[in-house]
Image (tube, helix red, strand yellow):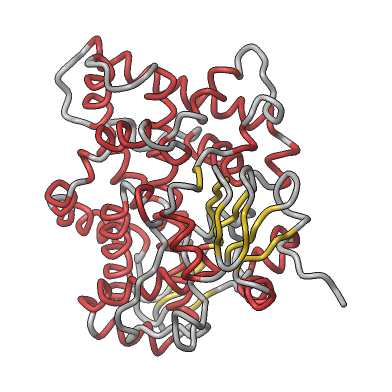
Amino acid sequence: MTKVTMAGIYRREHIDDPYPLYRRVREADPVYWDEEMGDQGAWMVTGYAPAQTALMDPRLSARRPHWGQDRLPGEPGLDAAQRAIDQQIVVSDAPEHTRLRQHLTRPFLRRQVDAMREDVAKLAHALLDAVLTGESGEFDAMDRFGFVLPAISLTGLLGIPAYDERYLSWMLSLGLLIDDGPLSRTHQRKLLGGVAEYTAFFAQQVAARREEAGRDDLVQTLADCYTDGGFANEEELHGNLAFLLTAGQVSTAHQIGNSLLHLLRDPEAYRRLREDPEAVAEATPELMRYDASIQLTKRRAREPFELGGHELRAGDEVFVWIGAAHRDPAQFADPERLDLGRSGVKHIAFGHGIHYCLGGRLGQLVHDEAVRAFVERVSAPRLLADPVERSVMPTFRGPYKLPVGYGR
């Protein structure tokens, strides 16, 4: 009998469609010990209920074991980058996490985010104005729209240039290190070099705020917070600014891409939203459940405890497969079907517990306005390539390219 393992997740067929592999592992056991994953084996959590527990149980640490000194190269010029990523909120535990969240969450409160809706909607339509130039044509819905809308929205919030050709490379470096897959392990020095450039960029931005205080943007707010003692050190500040831009840009862009891809594959679902664009917000939880842009997060057991009928040992690695949990038939009826009428969808695409996504409300707003504008404006759309070119890591899932034809 062939042994079940998640180790093939980086193969092309599973990058294109990981859900059959998720199903095989979940059917073996929703909390499954996989000897081929992690540094010395790891628990694969693919069931919805144990995934929820794993995301919120304080006995599981968010610290990334693979960022220790024994794995990442400690050498001049890269030490600061390593310390910066090791102090990001996504890998912190209380009390550091509590302190960081208090400072980083201010711009993402409901009132501040909701006030951005009109501007985001106008920008979405302006971007489509630029590509929908005739009765019939084609465009790349990621390059010209899906990546651009969250980028401009988030860089505007941060107060940094809307476009810098280095951003994508820096985000990819940080994303691959977070994913810790084969590419990360093969190119760790190069990727850390990218993160070093990334954090140096934010160091320059913070320095500019000190010279010209009073700007109304997030970098200014956090620079002032650092001056008041809100951050442990500059590397913690710069690392978290890099994380905010990467997580907000990449995850939102990929979710826009995933949602548009499945709507384009399902003409009836597309027609339904085109006839009632206001229904997009109601459909979003199901779109995020069906194909979330964040598929994986990791934890490590602080102490022995039970999860899904198994005894975890202190130090055990735990892979929480959010994408697999979203297809768990114990939680969702007929989970392999996209059903825009599905009610009461409780997805965990933004996480759960204290690590619930800081920018989840903004990400959903940008996603909703992107999808709403697209279905309103793009008539008779058709995919010009399928499968599409997409991210090579399961942690961040989504298309890089989405070639679309439109018109008759």
Please state the horizontal and vertical placement of residue 302, each as a whole percent of the image: 54, 42
Q: Nearer the viewer, residue 128 or 24?
A: 24
Question: Is 395 left or right of 163, judged from the image as shown?
Answer: right
Q: Quadrant of the C terminus?
A: bottom left
Q: Quadrant of the N terminus?
A: bottom right
35 w.r.t. 178: above or below: below
295 w.r.t. 171: above or below: below
Give me the residue at 73% from left, 46% from top.
182
Give me the residue at 53% from left, 52% from top.
297
Please state the horizontal and vertical placement of residue 107, each as a whole percent of the image: 21, 40
Give me the residue at 82% from left, 70% from top.
3
Please state the horizontal and vertical placement of residue 233, each as a whole percent of the image: 39, 16
Q: Is residue 17 visible?
A: no
Picture quadrant where residue 222 is located: top left
Q: Is residue 406 visible?
A: yes
Q: Nearer the viewer, residue 256 or 234?
A: 234
Please state the horizontal and vertical placement of residue 10, each as a whole percent of the image: 71, 58
Give me the residue at 39% from left, 55% from top.
252
377 w.r.t. 146: above or below: below
Looking at the image, which residue sits at the far right?
1
Question: Is 383 left or right of 242, judged from the image as shown?
Answer: right
| Count of number-bearing discs | 0
Question: Is 405 left or right of 311, judged from the image as shown?
Answer: left
Picture quadrant where residue 130 is located: bottom left
220 w.r.t. 247: above or below: above
